[in-house]
Image: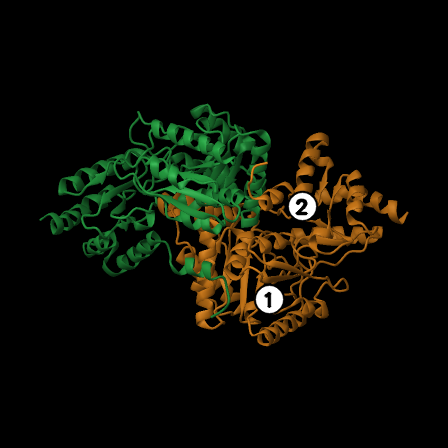
Chain colours: A green, B orange
Amino acid sequence: MPNINEKMMALGKCRSVIRDIFEYGNARAKEIGRENVFDFSLGNPSVPAPNEVDEAIAELNEGFGSVALHGYTSAVGDEGVRAAVAENINERFAAGVDKNDIYMTCGAAASLTITLNALVNDGDEVVAIAPYFPEYRVFAEAAGARFVSVPADTEAFQIDFDSFEAALSSNTKAVIINTPNNPTGAVLSEYTIRRLCSVLRDKSEEYGSPIYLISDEPYRELVYDENIVPPYLINEYDRTIVCYSFSKSLSLPGERIGYIVVSGRMDKSEHDDIYAAVCGAGRALGFVCAPSMMQRVVSRCLGKTADVAIYKKNRDLLYDALTEYGFECVHPDGAFYLFMKSPEEDATSFCEKAKKHELLLVPSDSFGCVGYVRISYCVSTEMIERSLPAFKALAQEYFG
Amino acid sequence: MPNINEKMMALGKCRSVIRDIFEYGNARAKEIGRENVFDFSLGNPSVPAPNEVDEAIAELNEGFGSVALHGYTSAVGDEGVRAAVAENINERFAAGVDKNDIYMTCGAAASLTITLNALVNDGDEVVAIAPYFPEYRVFAEAAGARFVSVPADTEAFQIDFDSFEAALSSNTKAVIINTPNNPTGAVLSEYTIRRLCSVLRDKSEEYGSPIYLISDEPYRELVYDENIVPPYLINEYDRTIVCYSFSKSLSLPGERIGYIVVSGRMDKSEHDDIYAAVCGAGRALGFVCAPSMMQRVVSRCLGKTADVAIYKKNRDLLYDALTEYGFECVHPDGAFYLFMKSPEEDATSFCEKAKKHELLLVPSDSFGCVGYVRISYCVSTEMIERSLPAFKALAQEYFG
């Protein structure tokens, strides 16, 4: 065996469970036809990008000039793009964000790896609240951190603060939150967020070392009730770093475009050091700049979203049907995931039984919370409709 | 001071010398007008992308379907794109590359960081031959390697094999070569490459541990003499990993699109392990997939290049003028850089004097080779023409 990096080899060989199921779905589709596979595995938006995206691409391609459009931007992102992003954030959240707080990235994963590599020293701990996106562990460990998982609050899918406080220590460098949440669709309430921030302030002081709050929010705009607006974390906690992606809001996941905001509400020198470390980490990891044309595209589409009404319709259709069949589901206020209790203890075994009905669901184990499955409803409404008899048959195996 | 990652902070604060000069140029342009600054600092292609790129973008934007076009591809890249890339390589070099040897990346820097993170264990050494692209050191060290620089062959800018052999050890995990070379424009001869590969084979056997050859070749298509075709390394050395980028060939540096080829001529299990480690490293560093639309764009433009004749014209104009003024230059056969001997020992001091003539040149120190400057001639021919009196005046300060 060649003496290469075994950790990386293992990560490559043990693909994420989600990707594995997705690849199985592709193979299965070749065997029995795409229309006969009900693939609920991947968070790949099913709603087209808004027309403004197509229009922006066409206009830039025709009129911007090839050399300027496709040339390198500054490593931190085009200045005009950063100014537009900051302005849009401030219009919506009055957060006082400056263009020089913004660092454009190749999407949410890049936002997270860059932020973690900027903050973490070997031995530091990074805390996430279950259930969480499984790649958090991969990203945190690759940055040299120990990953600490806070057990889920399976009552309300908010935060179990006893467990949360127990997970913090003087080694805690950062806490990652994700609201609306993947995989539950739950939105953290104002009460939860205020209490979380209060704990972080207290603990930072107690330990004499700052705990940063990393707010991973690709689903911010995907909320299905006008009355729910997830608080903007920069307004709640000074040591916040927002990791954003346009993947879900503009249905551009393959294009890899997002940004980091290093809150300007920290001490200036602390802010500047962290922003510099973000630049350094982006450089060391090999990101040069965020894709130049897409930087301009998103800056022309700020405030637009893909048609979220379709996801809401999917949610209602699926949630109503599955609960009617006897399944127990978390009611999702946002994102495009339904978190359903496995009717048997072992969610993986349940997913295997679902597979026999050509239903591809993701067991919750890798999200740090056993006994559930994640069902991505960013699929065609018509596929959901066609899949319902399969879900019904699956329910009958358990509930008769 | 916050206890964040100091290495990353230092990397962010000490920008690359090249980026620093580039930013100085932008600031200076605001003061005295863009037309009065002769910025030769950055390798940002000045020739527009070929028309086929614009056409491919327009066609994909209109006819491919938003969800498919902008959705995630497989982490390794779209299968059809990889097949097209492999076919194009095989047509040109008969290298027997398979689509499953290819991993699509976000450009050359990503190709390198992913490859290095896949191969390197702490304590391994990565060797590069001076003068080299300065970020090699950053990428290698961030991957946990010790970076070893082989002193330049300042006669022919090939390889000084005594120095090269002395730099190898049982800790050598990989050697990076770059031909055509940044910063010299030199192309490694067939003789040099055969001898290099022979040394690597011998040393791998002697140490009982394989040394990988990383061929960083963003400038492959930028060669100004039809008789010069840089050998395809996969045909020369079985343990080759090619890191490619379309940045220069298609003038798309801001779009971040390239690929890795893990040669299939290694033992199958060794190949598969390394390919898996590449996948794992891509995942751990936060690259999800290469930008999805650009994957399709480049696959439709394989074999096309930006108009290289313009660079050739620039090279001839600049080389002829500078040598006439008394400067000593390496004659560049490829890429778009001229490597000029500093007329005083300290190249940085020379660059400061050049700045007074508004000439922005890059001192060679960070390329691992003192006493030269890099002049990027991927600029408008007209700017070169306007800059010549400044070069002449600069020459007169030294040569009278």
- Specify the quadrant of the image occupied by residue A249: top left
The furthest residue to the right: B400
Give the camera-side residue of B42 and A157: A157
Q: Earlier in the sequence, mark 2 or mark 1?
A: 2
Vertical position of residue A90 compared to residue B45: above or below: above
Question: Residue A299: x, y in percent?
Answer: 48, 33
What subunit carries mark 2? B
Is residue B234 visible in the rendered image? The answer is: yes
Q: Horizontally, is A376 left or right of B112 in the view?
A: left
Amino acid type, residue under disc 2 in the picture:
Ile
Q: Horizontally, is A333 left or right of A81 in the view?
A: left
Instruction: Describe the element under mark 1 as helix, strand or loop.
Output: loop
Question: Residue B332: x, y in percent?
Answer: 71, 58
Residue lying at 32% horizontally and 27% vertically, measured from the top left: A228
Is label 2 on the same chain as label 1?
yes
Give the camera-side residue of B58 and B378: B378
Is residue A72 visible in the rendered image? The answer is: no
Amino acid type, residue under disc 1 in the picture:
Asn
Give the camera-side residue of B313 and A97: A97
Question: Residue A400: x, y in percent?
Answer: 8, 49
- In the rendering, which numbered label is found on residue B171? 1
Q: CA distance from mark 2 to mark 1?
A: 31 Å
- Specify the quadrant of the image occupied by residue A46: top left
Residue lying at 47% horizontally and 59% vertically, measured from the top left: B278
Vertical position of residue B121 compared to residue B138: above or below: below
- In the rendering, which numbered label is found on residue B18? 2
Residue lying at 36% horizontally and 29% vertically, measured from the top left: A230
- In the rendering, which numbered label is found on residue A263? none
What subunit carries mark 1? B
